[in-house]
Image (cartoon, helix red, strand yellow):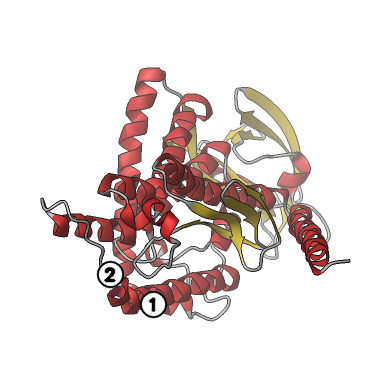
Amino acid sequence: MSDVSNTKMNDRARGILGFGLVVASLVSLGFVSRAMLVVTLVIVFVVFVHELGHFVAARITGMKATEFFLGFGPRLFSFRRGETEFGVKPILAGAYVKLVGMTNLDEVDVEDEARTYRQQSYPKRLLVASAGSLMHFLMAFIGLLALFSFLGDPVLEEGSWEVASVLEQENSLENSAAARAGLQTGDRILFVEGESTAAWEDLVEIVRNRPNETVQLEVRRGARDLSLVATLGVGPDGYGLLGVRGQQATNLVKYGPVETFKQTGVEFFSMVGQSIGGIWTIVANLGEVADRIISPPNDPSANDNLETRPVSLVGAVQIGASDRLSGSERMQLFVAFNVFIGVFNLLPLLPLDGGHIAIATYERIREGRTGRRHIIDTTRLLPVTYAVVAFLAFFGLGAIYLDIANPLGF
């Protein structure tokens, strides 16, 4: 058998093994938490769409893309369509599209020079560089349309409360009274044994005074009123326990087509502003952020100020998989995630997309009205680029550590 045949067989075997490992990892995550698997797949989809934006923009503008891979690390499997190799790598925390001639440092065959990124017009380079963030903004916009039209915008209702979460177990031996009674997140407990629980404090007082008693609960679940029976537990201090956590109640408000687009536009630009403000808050408080990143496990102060508390993809999965979130709240999280990533990627620093936009803009200014193409020497930017990469690595790995050592508790 020839060496070429052996190489092909080895590549095929490695591809099958790699694909199997990726699938097995996802299945294992599904056994741990189905919600975590779904959120992970959503994040992978978002990352894929970001790079798809770059790839489609490159194809439209005539640039040559030689690779389009989902994930990082060694190649697991791939296939070629035309001039582009598509494939998957094991670390599904990102993706990339390889365009020929991104900078003056890239060596390119003479016949491909005309199709390099660096030789294209300013509008074409601007489109390709910004396409990833534009896809994030598009997903956010569609998410907001779905939120306001179908899921409903969660609007706080003054003077009312609802069940935020149900404690599954009162102790290691038995379920909580609320779990046994069948209470669910979002339920509104109206009466306990005929006594009004309009305020959260009313429920606390009634339950505290009835340890081990069986009580009748009048509950509103959506548009239905239910009557449930709960046998209250008893805490170490002798007071009664139901096993629920309360929060201010929300109403899901849906809008008509015109109002939906109006609300979507207002909310989108508001979230863009919030993302810019959040990035500035982190930059302005780097010392505090660094202290949080190096905080010891189970540090009670690690999550005190959420404005300066970085969140990694691990934390995003933890939050998104929480059973305390409604469908509308998960959509809000999806939108906020896309807006933030879209804004962050536009920061004028290499290797972010905004760095390439800044370079293209500077080159266009230098060209002026001469019509002569100006390409900057990227080697001058390498020290700054390495510093940015080092900072992002520290920040990213530190945020992962923080989310594992001191999770947000969603």
Measured Cα–Cα span from mark 2 to mark 1:
21 Å
Residue 355, located in which quarter of the rendered image? bottom left
Residue 296, located in which quarter of the rendered image? bottom right
Give the residue at x 40% y 19%: 257
Disc number placed over residue 179 in the picture, else none: none
Could you tell me which quadrant the C terminus lies in?
Answer: bottom right
Q: Nearer the viewer, residue 23 or 42?
A: 23
Q: Determine if residue 151 is in view.
A: yes
How far across and how far down the image is residue 195, in percent? 60, 34
Q: Residue furthest right?
A: 1
How far across and how far down the image is residue 397, in percent? 52, 73
Q: Would you name the residue on which mark 1 appears? A: 386
Taking the image as shown, residue 39 lies to the left or right of residue 352, namely right
Give the residue at x 55% y 69%: 400
Foreground tag (2 vs 1)? 1
Q: Would you name the residue on which mark 2 appears? A: 284
Q: Determine if residue 301 is in view.
A: no
Taking the image as shown, residue 43 lies to the left or right of residue 137, namely right
**Other-residue count near label 2 (Cα within 10 Å), few / some / many at <14 / 14–19 / ≥20:** few
Q: Amino acid at mark 1?
A: Tyr
